[in-house]
Image (cartoon, helix red, strand yellow):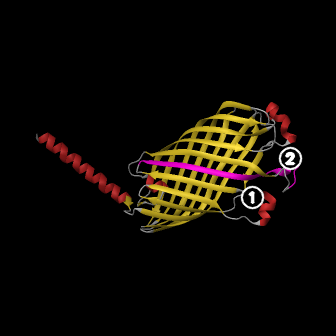
Amino acid sequence: MKKVTISLVLILSASQCFSELNNNIRDSLNYKLNVGMAFRMPIFDFSIHDTKEKSQKIYYSANVPLTLSASFYYKSLGISISKELTSTVDEAEKYGKTKYTDIQLHYFSKKFGYELYYQKYSGYYLDNFDVFGYLEGDENSIRPDIKNQNVGLNVFYVFSDRYSAKTLFNQSERQKKWNWSVIMMGSLNQLRINSNKNLIPSNEASYYDDDYNYRGGIYNFFTAGVGVAGILPFHNFYVSETILVGFGLSQSENQYLTNRKQGLDVFGKINFKIGMGYNGKRLYTGMNTSMDSTSPMESSSSVRFYTFSGYVEFFLGLKF
């Protein structure tokens, strides 16, 4: 009986010490409502290359100079909506105009983070038009017919008990001391690229064999990755970073002028985030940068499809 009593006392003491340790490391802010606004510069570019890598790489970019984003969190559940602002006339004449919508749902606990998102871009331009003998602003370099839709789910897991996903992904907790954790990510997403005419310039067609009239496709991605997240706080200021490296499979359906071709591709993925700012008891503000790229390692057709996406944002918010 004495041994059982001593064991219970030791367990309770260890639990209390662990709780006090966590309280010294993190500050849980007991606000239920979190409202924020951000000016965001989004990026979603894609490029095309032949599998033998003999042609010139073809780069397409969206012209979204600035967007306005609003976010609302109630406890651990949140939503953010972003929409493009008007671009300048000079930029529209050179690069066309991109219509942009981004809607995301978030849920964060101490160990897990969930992101469900819908992104839509309409209107692209050929970034390296001069390589293919095109003129800036002509119908071959400005492509309002190109549309991109990206829908998906990201799931994150934080390994360390001394580091919280709430600290990592939103401002509902503050980290008091420097800390880091190994994290894992799993994601599912479907990317659709559509266009009314060929995405491969005519003088590059010979490098793509029968796939020269490529017009986009449907790509179902499954990705698993592992990485490291860390945060360096100073009073209520902080610098944070996250880097993830992963691999995945893509069930693809490339679309051509007269047919479609299905296949299974293998790709690599890199995801990088860095943030800095001020996280007070009620007010928070700062800057976030996020970049994500996918590169095919094995392709089932003559077309290799690459993506590069991300954003830079300046944000301001209040907790209630």
Q: Quadrant of residue 193?
A: top right
Residue 94: within the magenta? no
Instruction: Give x and y (percent) for residue 123.
Output: 74, 53
Under circle 1, the secondary element is loop
Residue pointed to by mark 1: 97
> Does residue 37 appear left or right of residue 7 in this picture?
right
Q: What span is colored magenta in the figure?
A: 111-135
Determine the residue positioned at 34% across, 55% down: 22
Q: Earlier in the sequence, mark 1 or mark 2?
A: 1
Amino acid type indicated by mark 2: Phe
Viewer-closest of 157 and 64:
64
Amino acid type indicated by mark 1: Lys
For the question of whether residue 179 can be seen, the reply is no
Is 231 placed above or below 201 here? below
Is 38 placed above or below 153 here? below
Residue pointed to by mark 2: 132
Report the residue that reaches farthest toward the left: 1
Quadrant (top left/top right/bottom left/bottom right) for the N terminus: top left
